[in-house]
Image (spheres, rainbow, N blue to C red):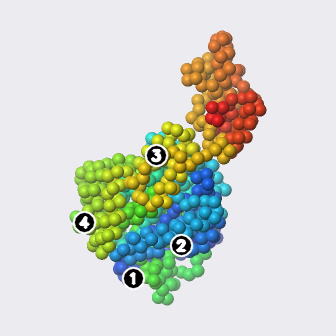
């Protein structure tokens, strides 16, 4: 999509030419398959590295475009959010030391990004979801100012007709609404590509689906969103909901999300797969096309199928078939989209090798797996892995396995066999697959992150804990060790002074509130029972309208007859409030000058939390 000047398809005068081009692309694809024009050998691999940019406070940086310009390298491209960039690695033939060479290339390009980022006060971080992302970082001002992102945002909102709804429940829960697709920008991944034989598309793609759950379980690295512990790989739920064009209705919705695992095994050809995609998902965007794919074929050249690529680029299968042209020859590859970025480059390369090895090591007994395994077991395995990581259990080959049993006893031997069959250097195979084995036996990135945050929360408030966690992740990544060797944070990896903090970082968000028509006696007794000194009062629309304080409790204890009143008759109504962006030094001065011990924190009249003198 980045190659073309795109526009919304709905209402566009280019809609008819786009549809004609899309249909011609399908016909051209059928022709190339029928006449055996696709490259089958050598087999190549490739990867895309998405990464986060953080500022000196370990929060998302807006400097992506400046850094991209500074880098000035065609391997790099922008992403949806201004705190993300992407590296496209060069394709490599699957043989010899291809993985270690790709590792070297990735390190070289990341070093280039780090040097450019440093000039703009930023750092490069690998994380499936950046721990310090908050709702304020999802404002449209954080969207990359490229037309294609605005067009995609408008197209999805127009099709959905409602705000984006986000509801993920794990250990904690996130339940939010948003007016753009910027939740998608919270996700960063290490997308791996493997070239396949188009004639074997059905079996190769179904095998990729079957192994996805166990592979994901050992790669999980994104357990947090906005300080909440959710899924082991929260990206799976977050990405699905962030660009969902289906709004909630009173009618049971049978349509799939644009981000999906699928509902059944593939039973037809590659062309059938793309036809089903066109049937199941409306095209969102179009562009000007320089040439017609059928005309190009007629002239003896291989078309790029740009209309089909535009459509396929807005349907986000976790295993996504991709068409490409290299050295004048068309090829098909499977793009693995579920593996997260990080925790280290070593971990990412190990994840990729493990997946490629299992893909190539498919035993003959699992040929035509769609006849031997229930698809719902494959799909259930995938979502179990997303929720529980290495704590998941899987149904495989008619038996129930723990993730450790399945990975160590079945998948790792399979990966070794597949890689050796492709003449991958034994030194590389043993190095990277030993990282997978060590991780299975110890901890994945998701578990390290959870344990690290819990240890930090014993001494820090959540915002500070998340910053120290992010700083620790950065410092561990610089050392290059895989995550199984990472120690928990000491707690001093980042130090913050009051002068650098804002109210939103220090306020109490889990507050007990009451409503204006509640019984004063009940609310005041609740304050006494819990030794709460301040209770914000909300109206029927949940807007802040008043405040009860400890002086009201003492007054009630001395005059219990006043408990018959409503809260509204007793509360303070002329409130002094703060915003989450207010500097803590300013809030402290305000509380001192007004001789108060509590500041409700609001956006408009919506209560976000409270700040008390204890928080200083």
Q: CB of mark 1 within 8 Å of CB of mark 2?
A: no
Q: Which of 41 and 90 is in front in this view?
A: 90
**Residue 75, disc:** 2
The image quarter in which residue 285 lies = bottom right
Above or below for 284 versus 178: below
Q: Earlier in the sequence, mark 1 or mark 4?
A: 1
Q: Name the residue under label 4.
A: 363
Residue 46 vs residue 405: left or right?
A: right
Q: Which of marks 1 and 2 is in front?
A: 2
Q: Nearer the viewer, mark 1 or mark 4?
A: 4
Q: Which residue is drawn at 50% across and 76% down?
A: 305
Q: Residues within 10 Å of mark 1 (few under 14, many from 20)?
A: some
**SS state under label 3:** helix
**Residue 37, disc:** 1
Q: Mark 3 points at which residue?
A: 452
**Residue 263, disc:** none
Q: CB of mark 4 within 8 Å of CB of mark 2?
A: no
Percent across and percent down for residue 244 are 52, 54
Q: Earlier in the sequence, mark 1 or mark 2?
A: 1
Q: Which residue is drawn at 53% across and 61% down?
A: 51
Above or below for 238 versus 478: above
Q: Which of 216 and 207 is in front in this view?
A: 216
**SS state under label 4:** loop
Q: Residues within 10 Å of mark 2 (few under 14, many from 20)?
A: few
């Amino acid at each position: 999509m980045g190659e073309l000047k795109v526009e919304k398809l709905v209402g566009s005068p280019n809609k008819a030419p786009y549809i004609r081009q899309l249909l011609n692309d399908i016909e051209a694809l059928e022709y190339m398959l029928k006449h055996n024009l696709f490259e089958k050998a050598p087999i190549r691999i490739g990867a895309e590295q998405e990464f986060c940019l953080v500022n000196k406070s370990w929060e998302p940086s807006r400097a992506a475009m400046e850094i991209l310009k500074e880098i000035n390298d065609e391997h790099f491209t922008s992403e949806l959010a201004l705190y993300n960039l992407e590296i496209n690695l060069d394709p490599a033939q699957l043989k010899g030391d291809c993985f270690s060479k790709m590792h070297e290339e990735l390190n070289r390009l990341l070093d280039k990004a780090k040097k450019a980022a440093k000039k703009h006060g930023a750092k490069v971080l690998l994380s499936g979801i950046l721990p310090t992302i908050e709702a304020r970082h999802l404002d449209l001002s954080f969207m990359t100012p490229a037309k294609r992102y605005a067009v995609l945002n408008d197209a999805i909102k127009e099709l959905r007709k409602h705000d984006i709804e986000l509801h993920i429940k794990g250990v904690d829960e996130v339940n939010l609404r948003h007016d753009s697709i910027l939740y998608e920008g919270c996700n960063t991944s290490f997308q791996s590509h493997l070239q396949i034989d188009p004639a074997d598309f059905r079996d190769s793609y179904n095998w990729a689906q079957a192994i996805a759950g166990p592979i994901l379980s050992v790669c999980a690295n994104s357990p947090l969103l906005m300080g909440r512990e959710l899924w082991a790989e929260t990206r799976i739920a977050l990405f699905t909901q962030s660009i969902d064009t289906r709004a909630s209705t009173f009618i049971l919705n049978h349509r799939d999300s644009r981000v999906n695992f699928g509902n059944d095994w593939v039973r037809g050809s590659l062309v059938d797969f793309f036809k089903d995609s066109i049937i199941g998902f409306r095209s969102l965007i179009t562009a000007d096309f320089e040439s017609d794919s059928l005309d190009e074929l007629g002239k003896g050249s291989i078309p790029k199928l740009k209309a089909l690529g535009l459509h396929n680029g807005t349907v986000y299968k976790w295993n996504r078939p991709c068409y490409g042209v290299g050295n004048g020859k068309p090829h098909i590859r499977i793009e693995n989209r579920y593996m997260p970025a990080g925790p280290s480059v070593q971990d990412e390369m190990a994840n990729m090798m493990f997946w490629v090895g299992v893909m190539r090591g498919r035993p003959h007994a699992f040929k035509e797996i769609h006849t031997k395994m229930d698809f719902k077991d494959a799909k259930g395995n995938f979502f179990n892995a997303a929720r529980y990581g290495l704590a998941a259990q899987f149904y495989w080959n008619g038996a129930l396995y723990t993730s450790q049993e399945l990975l160590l006893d079945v998948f790792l031997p399979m990966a070794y066999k597949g890689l050796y069959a492709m003449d991958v250097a034994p030194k590389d195979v043993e190095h990277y697959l030993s990282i997978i084995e060590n991780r299975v036996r110890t901890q994945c990135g998701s578990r390290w992150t959870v344990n690290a945050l819990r240890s930090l929360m014993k001494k820090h408030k959540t915002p500070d804990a998340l910053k120290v966690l992010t700083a620790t992740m950065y410092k561990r990544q610089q050392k290059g060790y895989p995550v199984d060797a990472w120690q928990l944070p000491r707690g001093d990896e980042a130090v913050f002074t009051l002068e650098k903090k804002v109210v939103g970082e220090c306020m109490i968000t889990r507050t007990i509130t009451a409503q204006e028509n509640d019984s004063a006696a009940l609310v005041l007794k609740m304050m006494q029972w819990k030794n709460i000194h301040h209770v914000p009062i909300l109206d029927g629309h949940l807007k802040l309208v008043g405040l009860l304080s400890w002086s009201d409790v003492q007054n009630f204890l001395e005059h219990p007859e006043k408990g018959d009143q409503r809260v509204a008759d007793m509360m303070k109504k002329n409130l002094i409030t703060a915003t989450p962006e207010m500097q803590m030094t300013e809030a402290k001065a305000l509380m001192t000058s007004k001789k108060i011990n509590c500041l409700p924190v609001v956006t408009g009249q919506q209560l976000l939390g409270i700040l008390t003198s204890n928080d200083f």
